[in-house]
Image: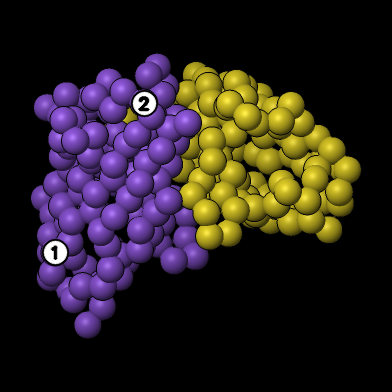
Amino acid sequence: EVRLLQSGGGWVQPGGSLRLSCVGSDFTFSSYAMSWVRQAPGKGLEWVSDIASAGFTTHYAASVKDRFTISRDNSQNTLYLQMDNLQAGDTAIYFCAKPGLTSWSFDSWGQGTLVTVSS
Amino acid sequence: EIVMTQSPATLSVSPGESATLSCRASQSLGADLAWYQQKPGQAPRLVIYDASSRATGIPARFSGSGSGTDFTLTISSLQSDDLGVYYCQQYRGWPPWTFGQGTKVEIK
């Protein structure tokens, strides 16, 4: 069974930085693109970023572009999200998510990690 | 950006009855649409992909239909375990992938 185990997150003041991690297991991590999706408290789902399987191609939502950086270490089966210049609007639960090989539906999700940006 | 609109916002259904959830896209998606179930405090769970294919482990009472701009998720013979918020997601127009605002399914 595919597992995605997240770590990182917590509380940070506006303008601060955090890094999230997501370790994949029981699947060939290096064969799959990966994504981050977030959910503000009491709100719906918002795609944040994705990265191709080899890590050379990335995409970002307009709301986080130039502040967040997605990366991966396929030797460690780990996905990262570096979040800089965090703002109150970035407060959310962040999920890593794995799409299928032939579909961008997300068939596996991490447990989620809460990021709180507040002074 | 493709906008996804779900209706209704809340659906109250008695156990054993059917629930019909709708999702409309602002542009044609072909069949590039997924449905997710999210229970309180949990990550979303894929229910349907490619508009009508059930994900692994999803009971046969869940079915998806539609193509283009109009899609439906039907839960036949609703069970108490089916409560939660259901989101549709398009993966035709990218980036960004976009989700609907969700339909909350309540047990009456």
Q: Which quadrant does the N terminus of chain B fall into? A: top left
Instruction: Name the residue: 51% across, 46% down.
Output: B44
Q: Is residue B107 left or right of residue A119?
A: right
Percent x, y of residue B81: 73, 48
Local packing at callout 1 (Cα closer than 10 Å; few below 14, some 14-19, many 20+) is some
Chain letter belonging to callout 1: A
Q: Amino acid at mark 1?
A: Ser
Q: Which residue is mark 2?
A: A27
Same-chain check, marks 2 and 1:
yes
Chain A on-screen colour: purple
Q: Which residue is mark 1?
A: A17
Say whether residue A35 is visible: yes
Q: Is residue A69 left or right of residue A31?
A: left
Q: Nearer the viewer, mark 2 or mark 1?
A: 2
The secondary structure type at the circle numbered 1 is loop
Mark 2 or mark 1, earlier in chain: 1
Q: Quadrant of residue A23?
A: top left
Report how far apart the C-alphas of labels 2 and 1 lie in the structure. Answer: 30 Å
Q: Is residue B80 left or right of residue A41?
A: right
Percent x, y of residue A110: 40, 46
Q: Amino acid at mark 2?
A: Phe
- When the figure is inspected, residue B91 is found, relative to residue B42, above or below; the finding is above
- Name the foreground residue: B2 vs B99: B99
- Name the foreground residue: B108 vs B103: B108
Local packing at callout 2 (Cα closer than 10 Å; few below 14, some 14-19, many 20+) is few
Percent x, y of residue A98: 37, 33
Evaluate if marks 2 and 1 touch, with contact meaning CB atoms under 8 Å apart.
Answer: no
Q: Which chain is yellow?
A: B
